[in-house]
Image (cartoon, rainbow, N blue to C red):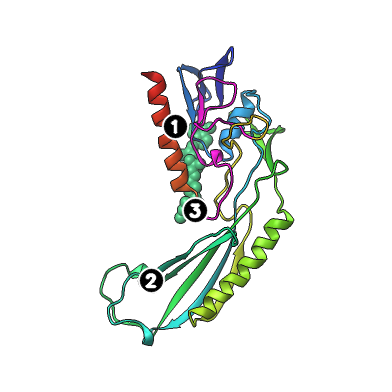
Amino acid sequence: MTEVLTNNGKAVGVKVMTRDKKTYNLKGKTVDLSASTFETPRILLNSGIPGRAIGHYLTTHTRITGVGNIRTAGFPETLGVLALLVPRTAERDYQIQLSGSYFNYLYELKPMLEQVNVGYGASGVVESRYENYVVLNPRRVDDYGVPELEVEFSYSAKDKEVFRRMGEGVKRALEASQATQTSLSSLTAGLVYHDMGTCRMGYDPATSATDPYGQIHGVQGLYVADNSVIPTSGAANPTLTTVALAIRTADHLMKQLR
Ligand SMILES: Cc1cc2nc3c(=O)[nH]c(=O)nc-3n(C[C@H](O)[C@H](O)[C@H](O)COP(=O)(O)OP(=O)(O)OC[C@H]3O[C@@H](n4cnc5c(N)ncnc54)[C@H](O)[C@@H]3O)c2cc1C
């Protein structure tokens, strides 16, 4: 799919191309884009859909992973699943997920190891800022004639502070669980795969691309249901939130069609 077709502020269908570059216009009363945080704004921008926020407010998570060895001597005799979540709070803009070798063993019976490797995976909140955006680059087009995207992204001072405190938090979690740290690594933008926000939901067309049901402001029948609608990153993995919002959008659509 390369474009959304509109008429008088209403979605009327989509333009698609086959691999051998034949173009078809498919009619539809509603169009629901779920092409991802990068591809959905790309299609919208390529279709000339207006909206100040489309492509902007790109966000993601910062990520630090610590790994440590924990001696199993103090473990209870019956092992459960080694998986703990230290949640984000109002004061702590990150979460830490602890998971260990026995987590990966699931419930199978295995011989008890003297030590287990435990991962301390922390995800940090990244601010949603207009200054982080994707835009079409008309000088580079793909095989279907659609301009490629350029990405402009940087961390704010607040993001860097969350990242710093998250590193301290992971070290504290290692110490508190009496683990011997074996590695500490970090992932930055583009490598966390939790990109969000380029068609964020909200009430105000100045700061959001869609309304709270995922409909693009000012274009009747044009909906978005993917990670791009998430308005702020939070600290948790995004996919379940996206799925929940997509179900909500589908319920809303059903009511409109009745
Ligand atoms: C290795 C890895 C591990 C991950 N682990 C987790 C995890 O543990 N928890 C979590 O919450 N998230 C995880 N994620 C992130 C998760 O994959 C994304 O949050 C989720 O897939 C985003 O969904 P989406 O619908 O926005 O985009 P996508 O899942 O990317 O779906 C977009 C779809 O649109 C199609 N498409 C794109 N452009 C077009 C076009 N022009 N025409 C037609 N179709 C098009 C694509 O082919 C694709 O099928 C992980 C990602 C990776 C890569």
Of residues 189 and 25, the one drawn nearer to the viewer in this rendering? 189
Tally the numbered discs: 3
Left or right: 124 as drawn, with respect to 137? left
Q: Mark 3 near ligand 1 (CB under 8 Å)?
A: yes
The quarter of the displayed image where residue 106 is located: bottom left
Which segment is the magenta one? 208-237
Inspect the image, locate mark 3, and give the three-letter code of the amino acid beneath it: Asn
Mark positioned earlier in the residue sequence (1 or 2)? 2
Residue beneath label 1, please? Answer: 249
CB atoms of marks 3 and 1 within 8 Å: no
Residue found 57% across the figure and 60% down from its top? 94
Residue 190, percent across and down? 61, 52
**Amino acid found under the numbered disc labelled 1:** Thr
**Position of residue 237 measured from the top left corner of the image (x, y, whole percent):** 49, 53
- Which residue is situated farthest in the front direction here? 90
Secondary structure under tag 1 reads: helix
